[in-house]
Amino acid sequence: MSTARILIRCPDRAGVIARVASFLAGAGLNILDADQHTDPGTGRFFMRIEFDRGSGNPMPDADDRARTEAEFTAAVAEPLAMDASFRWPGRTKRIAVLVGPSLHCAADLLWRVSTGEIACEVTRVISNHDAASELAERFGHPFHHLPVAESSKPLQEAAIADLLDADQHNPAGLDLIVLARYMQILSDTFTAARPGLIINIHHSFLPAFAGAKPYHQAFERGVKLIGATSHYATADLDEGPIIAQNTAHVSHRDTVDDLVRKGRDLERTTLADAVRLHLDDRVLIEGSKTIVFD
């Protein structure tokens, strides 16, 4: 990440874009990309701006960044009832990966990270199955095997929380927790403590076929399309704000195994899309929905 970004949401009104652009120009900041959306139903305005100092000039240092944010808050954000967050360059974003017995999504994600296709650092791989240890070792990431049984689930989840809290409290921080087919229901307490920080991949085109064995459900219904959905995890199972979805055609000739095989490809790409969008600061959560500047 070599450029800075600002994410904005506020009530829509005339002059919002001009006020933001005028402030950035006055601060010597050069807009490289801008995207905005107004929801006519709610009257809410959303915007993503990417900027730098222009002509190869270095970005503001820590003091200048703090001053810029404070001045923006006073001059623009507060008068416009605006929620604005700056994302400055200079640090590598960090993710933790939770994976269950199906390794295809985690393997694909770790490969994309290893090639630089997804620019981030993996802090650790956590699994309730030891089968993921070889995968983590292959890509050089710390691995934690935390088995789970019904009676030990609260303790196992607490152990996961301790590891993730260590990452979040690290000066480098933690930007995302990826459930790469982890296939365990997280407690309300766990998700509520990490709003907008957990991305899940579900193997159906939500809201259709939520819950267990969606490919079997799809086969029984004789669908002609199957899908995969990546969404933020919330207390409501498979109902968090959706980030990315993909579909594939199927027919009466396809068996359940065929649906599973085709679906795995969708799961890989859909999860990768969602992780990339989140790390690129292209997603704003608004209630049960997302605004995705793709």
Image (cartoon, grey):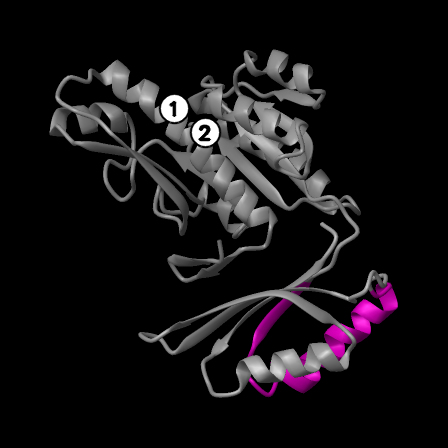
Question: Would you identify the image quadrant in which residue 93 lies?
Answer: top right
* Above or below for 138 versus 94: above
Give the image location of residue 206, x and y in percent.
Answer: 29, 42
Residues under numbered marks 1 and 2 in contact, where contact means CB atoms less than 8 Å apart: yes
* Above or below for 92 versus 269: below
Circle 1 SS class: helix
Q: Is residue 118 left or right of residue 3?
A: left
Residue type, label 1: Arg
Question: Would you identify the image quadrant in which residue 276 lies?
Answer: top right
Residue 7 lies in the magenta-colored region:
no
Give the image location of residue 261, x and y in percent.
Answer: 33, 18
Task: Name the residue that disc number 2 marks.
Answer: 268
Residue nearer the viewer, 255 or 151:
255
User: Is residue 54 something that shows in the picture?
Assistant: yes
What are the residue bounds of the magenta stretch? 60-86
User: Is residue 186 something that shows in the picture?
Assistant: no
Circle 2 SS class: helix
Residue type, label 2: Arg
Badge 2 density bin: few <14, some 14–19, many ≥20, Cα 10 Å: many
